[in-house]
Image (spheres, grey):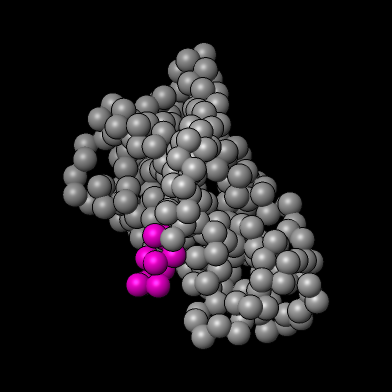
Amino acid sequence: MRLFCKYLKIHLKSQMQYRISFLLITMTQFIVAFSSLASVFFLMNRFHEVNGFTFQEVLLCFASILMAFSLSECFARGFDRFNTVISNGTFDRIMVRPRNIILQVLGSQIEFSRLGRLVQAIIVFCYAIPACGVVWTPDKILLLTLMVLSGVVVFSGLFIIHAALCFFTTEGLEFINIFTDGGREVGSYPISIYGDAIMKIFTYVVPLSLVQYYPFLYLTDRSSNPWLFALPLIACLFLIPCLLLWRFGVRHYRSTGS
């Protein structure tokens, strides 16, 4: 943890060397995320509710997924851009250093400008939490926290899969973006509105439903099943096969010769 904090400090100092550029990139990230928020607003302004969920409730889903994705993209960016680490031979140097490989990859690239999306998620939360009609008891506050944290774990797991596949392809495979960026867009609404097929994919393949839709039913009192409270923790188990795939890739890695 001490080493990772040093990585954070180094990246923050380096990015602050060009403060105007950093602020502009952060604002760009905010504006890009705002386009998704605008689409939610215009849709709900026209139809008022989707599948029985009100605008304020949809915003709660939107903010929780956006916050999870923003934190994951900021701190797990090293895995998302791992193809460059492979292709330029940097991973060879990483392997001979006497430190944990995953920690080094995490620390290889941390983009604080991605927190522009996090700012928007916080703003949406500030509106949606008091306006959504949820009676906020301690267990629901804890559940909302678990939804965000487990979302970070799931998105980070997807980035790890993307990185692990680079051991065999060198270049990153774009289809992973269906589950990362696509998952962020799908999670902007309660996932049940997309039908059974999409619901099953994001439950049994990529467990975003476990960190968004099912706990959301508990938050909004649409279900009192106490097992829904445990689903975000179960979703964190998704990280296990992701790490196993990563370990398999490391064992079969052969230098690119760069």
Relative image position of residue 34 (x, y in whole percent): 50, 28
Residue at position x 52%, y 72% from top?
104
Please tell me in which quadrant of the rendered image residue 226 appears.
Answer: bottom left
| Up-down relation of residue 55 to residue 229 (above or below) | above
| Up-down relation of residue 102 to residue 187 (above or below) | below
| Up-down relation of residue 140 to residue 84 (above or below) | above
Please tell me in which quadrant of the rendered image residue 152 appears.
Answer: bottom left
Quadrant for the C terminus, please. bottom right
* Residue that lies at the very extreme toward the front in this rendered image: 17
Pick the front one: 235 or 52:
235
Magenta span of residues:
1-9
Magenta segment main secondary structure:
helix
Quadrant for the N terminus, please. bottom left
* Residue that lies at the very extreme toward the left in this rendered image: 138
Relative image position of residue 182 (x, y in whole percent): 62, 43
Residue at position x 66%, y 71% from top?
90
Residue at position x 39%, y 50% from top?
148
Residue at position x 48%, y 21% from top?
41
In the displayed structure, does residue 1 sit left or right of residue 75? left
| Up-down relation of residue 209 to residue 106 (above or below) | above
Residue 72: in sight, yes or no? no
Relative image position of residue 52 (x, y in whole percent): 44, 28
In the displayed structure, does residue 175 sit left or right of residue 136? right
Q: Does the magenta stretch include residue 246?
A: no
Relative image position of residue 27 (x, y in whole percent): 48, 32
Pick the front one: 112 or 172:
112
